[in-house]
Image: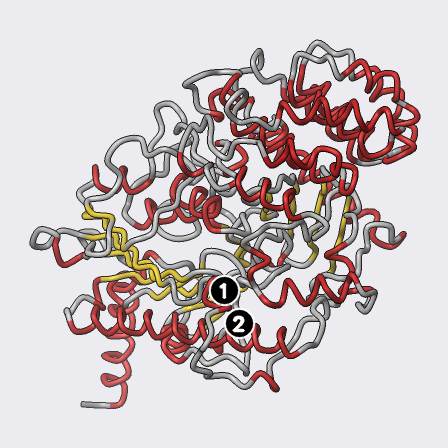
Amino acid sequence: MTLGRIYLVAVTLAFLSSRALAEKPTGHPNILWLTSEDHGPQMGCYGDRYASTPNVDRLAAKGMIYTHVWSNAPVCAPARTTLISGMYAPSTGGEHMRSLVPYPRGMKMFPQILREAGYYCTNNAKEDYNLAKPGKVWDASNAKAHWKNRQPNQPFFAVFNSVKSHESKLRVRPHRAIHDPARVPIPSYHPDTPEVRQDWAQYYDTVTEADADAGARLKELEQAGLAEDTIVFYFADHGSGMPRSKRSPCNSGLHVPLVVHFPRKWRALAPREYKEGGKCDRLVSFVDFAPTVLSLAGIKPPGWMQGHAFLGEFATPEPPYLFGFRGRMDERYDLIRSVTDGRYVYVRNYLPHLIYGQHVEYMFQTPTTRVWKHLHDQGKLTAAQEIFWNRKPPEELYDLQSDPDEVKNLAHSPMHQEIMKRMRQAQQGWARSIRDVGFLPEGERFTRAPGESPYDLGHNEKKYPFDRIFAMAEYASILDPKATDTLKKGLTDDESAVRYWAALGLLMRGAKGYMAGSEALHQALQDRSPYVRIVAAQALGQFGSADDQKVALRTLLPLCDMVKNDVFVAVAALNALDALGDRVKPSKEAIKALPTKGKLPDPRYSPYVPRLLQDLRTQGE
């Protein structure tokens, strides 16, 4: 054979090979999710030299990693709620940790759509959704769920979740050490103490253990002869379980690893930039995963899904931003929204009078949290370490290139005002587009439209006049001193949520807000809404006279009774009571007599009143 013919044959074979790769084969790919809990991109494939993650590193070497992936929520239940629905949890009302609300009318969880298309769908084993399941979602969802139980030749979608890296594992003692605490990298927001080093090293140990679980599943797939038929995802459900990562809607709490591997058979479904051992800088978040899996299965995602498919037949252009959120964290309320464009992170604190380090009982079980708080109380922290324990500013802006730890707030930097304006508009536009129901007191999601989902409530203008409520929340929380008259006027509005935010606005301004709105706050003690009364009473109790403090206690204590009210009113009232500090001492006996059980829409809400009562009963000890 001449050289010319050899060259022609080689070119022809190369062409046919590339064409075969470009053409989608018949049938449907298997899709495997390997997930783990509470860890960020502290992995070897992401350049972390301290980490030991050989199995996921090998998967990344033959697949591709995504560098900008957010979990949307910095804690498991709302993050998983966003995953399973393809909708942002503040849109569905499922952003609180933990909660349970009805599913939007006429919509489905994405495995239901896969099952209708012939897929065998299994989940092994954690669900933890804040949305009630709209019928049968999985073919099997338990510790025995497995793809091997499907019908012959049936395509599968399977999830295997490792709990090895969960926050709770950080504090297990004794512990078999893998990483040396003396060598562990410590972020600038944490104090460098033996306890912190031990927790960070143990965190890396747990990530190694989760990596081993992933390796076992990948080996099982290979031994079953299914590797060439299966698209594999590896990701974690939110950032590290360390405090200021977990529960923080900054990059430290939302940034997760994502590795995707396409076998050659299904390479046509990969994005153009896919290459073995490659990296992709596309912005991706959990709300995108449901439409992406449907796209890989050849199913056009339904229009009500709010995410963007980033793989498969129905992949869409890259979105310009990712969005994050924080709602109630167990027994403590908060309302934070965040945005990133990949470089900058904008944080909007709608309750800036609350600190990041609120006393969430579960978080305080981690030794780092306790020693960090102790050093704060002693005045021994650096400026970067103090941020967690101080009042939040209304707005934050961080440059991840120069400040990966997110401790240098650029919100007031003259050089960054155009960026601030752009990111602020993105956040406000997103809240409007999804009709964020987080601006309602949690209990009103049930009382405004009994039996209806918060999503459907949120899209009913008569029941949820979003623009009016959102405008007052903006006035209240941006802390403009010129807004006081608007807030006082807001306390006379016919919409209770507007009055609620007006009262909050005066409370957020501290003693000055109380003085400016004292008369209106006293009148608000008679408001029809218990949530308005609670905020007004807290303002009187914190900043008023001795007589005002007595009035505040008389108002709040009956509202703390979850038998006479409900769990949402009781949790709100107990948080207000807790904010009064030593001023609650005259009511110690009354607090001891408060019930720990009462009206619950679901058992998921049961721990919160007992935890708050325990904090109040031990306050000052």
Q: Quadrant of residue 410?
A: bottom right
Q: Residue at x 48, y 37 (%)?
A: 306
In the picture of the structure, the residue carrying the numbered disc 1 is 39
Residue 519 x, y percent position in the rendering: 88, 16
Q: Nearer the viewer, residue 483 or 331?
A: 331
Residue 183, image quadrant:
bottom right
User: How far from the left and from the top, in percent, is residue 273?
Assistant: 46, 64
Tell me the residue at 64%/62% (across/down).
369
Q: Residue at x 48, y 16 (%)?
A: 449
Q: Is residue 506 left or right of residue 482?
A: left
| Secondary structure of the residue carrying numbered label 1 | loop
Locate residue 157 relative to residue 547 in the image: left or right: left
* Disc number placed over residue 42 in the picture, else none: 2
Is any part of residue 525 visible from this angle? yes
Is 30 drawn above or below residue 337 in the view shown? below
The one of 351 and 42 positioned closer to us in this rendering: 351
Find residue 488 and name its label. Answer: none
| Residue 55 percent across, percent down from the top left | 36, 77
Which quadrant would the N terminus be assigned to in this image? Answer: bottom left
Residue lying at the far front of the rendered structure: 589
Disc 2 secondary structure class:
loop
Find out whether the residues at labels 1 and 2 contact each other: C-beta distance under 8 Å: yes
Residue closest to the far left = 152
Colour convention: secondary structure
Q: Is residue 327 visible?
A: no
Q: Tag 2: residue type?
A: Gln
Q: How many neighbours does mark 1 have within 10 angstroms: few (below 14), some (14-19), or many (20 or more)?
A: many
> In this view of the protein, which residue sits in the foreground, 551 or 208?
551
Image coords of residue 583 (percent x, y): 79, 37
User: Which sits in the foreground, 304 or 507?
Assistant: 507
| Residue type of the residue flagged with mark 1 | His
